[in-house]
């Protein structure tokens, strides 16, 4: 198959096949458009930062006039067409497309120009391609004059072997390096990184540093203010540890059985199994993406601000989602051989789970649970920020008393020391236990 | 016919993924007490055939009659009852590595025991005695409380055989039971299969890679090539020409003694 022949018979390929063929091109187009848009945004942001454009308001924000947006959009669109006509773009590269002549030769300048013009002239009619009767390889103004957009995966056996060059000299390498550089530059500016400031401000903040490093343990065992329901560091330490412990244990107990519902190999390949699997996985992912400190906002409103129950509930819920996902991935990774062997003896499906799956996953379950316990301890120390209870209650209390109490920073220092020590000890213990299991 | 344990008619299996025609209209019967050896190159469909018989994979078309029961039409409950009468052993042994040998052997009994008791790993005294007796029979009684992955390959396959014995099966299917073992161990494992066949009257279907083993243990041979039967007959009927036909022109006979 050197030259795709034009077919006379109308519509030989189903619509779905056309979509499958067209999808990578559409994806490449959208990706390139997005990346050019990103470049445009980055350049405008940086211009604004360095040279204060005409359209900068009082606060230094970029306020383009209304007509500028269509211009930017069209200009980036034009850039995409240019790069696609030249056959060089990140999108084409990533979606495995290559612009070549019909004989697999590199596209000539003429073909590129022809393609560039054709892209413009035929743009309004592109949707019609879904109903055209052209062979699949020739969809979208492919032809002798404009070159062909080949899917590399389909023709790679016929292509002459490429000699490996230096990756950073390829178009893709240059583009990725450019995008990375732009992102780094933008990141530097947007996060207001200023190394000079680090040095300049040392003297101004030195008294705070001094206070922080001379912690005062007045409230180590003594309550701060019983009537205001503020107790001692030890009291809150206990609250923190037990909050994390309770959330981890109950979360793990709930996550254990439902993790099987989120495992592809257990749920089977019928429609019902697939539905349950998808629902569980979506649920895990959705819940997991909400940090427990955000959930704690909700629960603190529900059960009371500063109530450790709120923090425990938030950690519990997040633990279920996080462990549920990790557990079900473990279930999916078990060796299928023994399961097959047990099923072949006439065992029921849940017997296969008990005798085949569970023994295989126990060690990694324990490791994951301990790891989760680490995370929960850390989160429990700061969840008080939103009223979740625990040691953070004191931390944020003293931090807020800075103007009113003379030794506020010393107290903050004491709480931080307590947190660091506890986290360090529990980390060490769980690392040792995990070592033992693994 | 009552002395047919298995009758397979027009069995076809197409793997949707990859669109492979793994079995193409295969029909044959296996008599009670037979030791049938499956031969064929890698990819000829031996494993597929065995797994279709107990429906570890679903056949695309055709029927499988086991002792007068249509396996292909069985409900999941019937299928479990059929499966406990047909044991299977595997090339990779397929033991649960982190469980003890005894638990692995006992799991062969899961089709029979009361579900509630098995949920908490409780087996009757009878079953445990039976498991110990079976381990004794395959020559590794002292390994009962070790973890399965502490055993050598040959020992693991014997655990597999003990697990099969627990089912008190009518049919034993062995998918390349000795491919991962050295020649001496191969023979001892094959001899256990032979004993089951001769003394317990268990019908055996085993896929093997060595013609010498097939000749030594088989009472009948079935050869597959690209999912079709290319030879069916007695072990003595396979000569040089037949061998070439099964394994291709390049093949040379290798012996295991
Ligand atoms: N799960 C699967 N999905 C798709 N194709 C498969 C699958 N399993 C097997 N096949 C294909 O089916 C054909 C028969 O495979 P099968 O495993 O039955 O052969 P075999 O005779 O047991 O080979 P071997 O001696 O290597 O075990 C092969 O072409 C294989 O690639
Ligand atoms: Mg096989």
Image: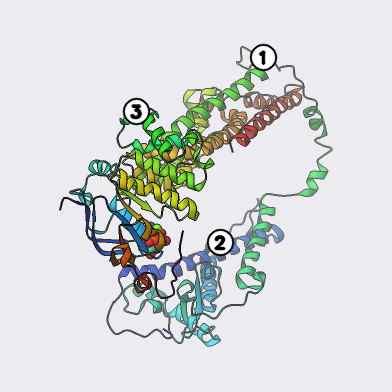
The residue positioned 78% from the left and 49% from the top of the image is A195
Circle 3/circle 1 CB separation < 8 Å: no
| Front residue of this view, candidates B244 and B188 | B188
* Residues behind callouts 3 and 1 on a single chain: no
Q: Name the residue carrying label 3.
A: B126
Q: Name the residue carrying label 1.
A: A223
Label 1 crowd bin: few (<14), some (14–19), many (20+), radius 10 Å = some
Residue at the outermost right position: A203
Quadrant containing the C terminus of chain A in the rendered view: top right
Residue at the outermost left position: B1
Residue A62 in view? yes
- Mark 1 or 2, nearer chain start: 2
Q: Is residue A321 left or right of residue B122?
A: right
Residue A388 in view? no
Closer to us: mark 2 or mark 3? 3
| Front residue of this view, candidates A185 and A132 | A132
Label 2 crowd bin: few (<14), some (14–19), many (20+), radius 10 Å = few
Q: Name the residue carrying label 2.
A: A65
Q: Quadrant of ligand 1?
A: bottom left
**Quadrant hosting residue B45:** bottom left
Report helix, strand or loop for mark 1.
Answer: loop
């Amino acid at each position: 198959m050197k030259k795709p022949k034009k077919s006379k018979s109308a519509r030989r390929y189903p619509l779905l096949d056309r979509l499958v063929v067209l999808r990578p091109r559409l994806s490449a187009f959208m990706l390139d458009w997005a990346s050019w848009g990103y470049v445009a945004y980055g350049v405008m942001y940086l211009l604004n930062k360095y040279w204060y454009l005409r359209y900068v308001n009082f606060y230094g924000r970029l306020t383009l006039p209304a007509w500028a947006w269509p211009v930017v959009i069209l200009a980036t669109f034009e850039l995409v067409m240019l790069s696609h006509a030249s056959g060089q773009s990140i999108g084409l590269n990533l979606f495995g497309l290559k612009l070549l002549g019909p004989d697999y030769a590199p596209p000539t300048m003429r073909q590129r120009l022809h393609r560039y013009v054709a892209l413009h002239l035929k743009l309004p009619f592109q949707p019609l391609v879904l109903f055209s009767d052209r062979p699949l390889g020739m969809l979208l103004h492919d032809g002798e004059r404009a070159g062909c957009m080949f899917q590399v995966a389909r023709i790679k056996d016929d292509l002459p072997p490429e000699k490996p060059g230096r990756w950073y000299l390829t178009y893709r390498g240059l583009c990725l390096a450019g995008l990375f550089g732009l992102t780094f530059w933008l990141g530097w500016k947007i996060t207001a990184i200023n190394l000079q400031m680090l040095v300049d401000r040392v003297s101004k903040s030195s008294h705070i540093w001094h206070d922080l490093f001379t912690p005062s343990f007045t409230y180590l065992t003594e309550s701060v203010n019983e009537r205001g329901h503020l107790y001692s560091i030890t009291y809150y330490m206990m609250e923190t540890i037990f909050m994390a412990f309770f959330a981890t244990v109950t979360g793990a107990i709930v996550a254990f059985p439902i993790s099987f519902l989120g495992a592809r190999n257990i749920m089977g390949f019928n429609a019902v199994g697939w539905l349950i699997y998808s629902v569980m996985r979506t649920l895990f992912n959705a819940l997991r993406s909400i940090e427990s400190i955000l959930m704690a906002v909700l629960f603190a409103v529900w059960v009371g601000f500063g109530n450790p129950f709120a923090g425990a509930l938030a950690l519990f819920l997040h633990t279920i989602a996080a462990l549920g996902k990790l557990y079900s991935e473990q279930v999916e990774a078990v060796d299928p051989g023994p399961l097959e062997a047990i099923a072949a003896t006439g065992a029921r499906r849940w017997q296969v789970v008990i005798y085949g799956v569970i023994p295989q996953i126990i060690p990694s379950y324990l490791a994951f649970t301990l790891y989760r316990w680490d995370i929960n301890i850390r989160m429990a120390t700061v969840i008080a920020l939103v009223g979740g209870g625990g040691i953070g209650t004191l931390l944020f209390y003293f931090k807020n008393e800075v103007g009113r109490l003379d030794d506020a920073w010393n107290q903050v220092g004491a709480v931080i020391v307590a947190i660091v020590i506890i986290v360090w000890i529990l980390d060490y213990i769980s690392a040792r236990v995990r070592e033992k299991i693994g | 016919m009552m002395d047919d344990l298995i009758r397979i008619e027009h069995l076809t299996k197409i793997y949707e993924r990859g669109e492979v025609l793994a079995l193409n209209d295969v029909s044959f019967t296996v008599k009670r007490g037979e030791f049938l050896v499956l031969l064929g190159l890698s990819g000829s469909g031996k494993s597929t055939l065995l797994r279709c018989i107990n429906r570890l994979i679903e056949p695309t078309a055709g029927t499988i009659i086991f002792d007068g029961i249509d396996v292909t039409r069985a409900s999941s409950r019937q299928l479990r009852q059929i499966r406990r009468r047909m044991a299977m052993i595997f090339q990779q042994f397929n033991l649960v590595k982190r469980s003890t040998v005894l638990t692995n052997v006992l799991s062969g009994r899961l089709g029979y025991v009361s579900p509630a008791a098995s949920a908490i790993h409780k087996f009757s005294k009878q079953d445990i005695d039976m498991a110990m007796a079976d381990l004794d029979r395959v020559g590794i009684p002292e390994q009962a409380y070790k973890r399965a992955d502490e055993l050598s390959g040959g020992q693991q396959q014997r655990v597999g055989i003990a697990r099969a014995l627990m089912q008190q099966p009518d049919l034993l299917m062995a998918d390349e039971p000795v491919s991962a073992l050295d020649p001496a161990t191969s023979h001892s494992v094959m001899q256990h299969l032979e004993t089951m066949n001769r003394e317990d009257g268990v019908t055996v279907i085993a896929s093997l890679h060595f013609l010498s083993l097939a000749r030594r243990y088989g009472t009948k041979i079935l050869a597959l090539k690209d999912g079709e039967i290319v030879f069916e007959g007695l072990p003595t009927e396979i000569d040089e020409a037949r061998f070439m036909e099964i394994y291709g022109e390049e093949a040379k006979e290798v012996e295991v003694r």
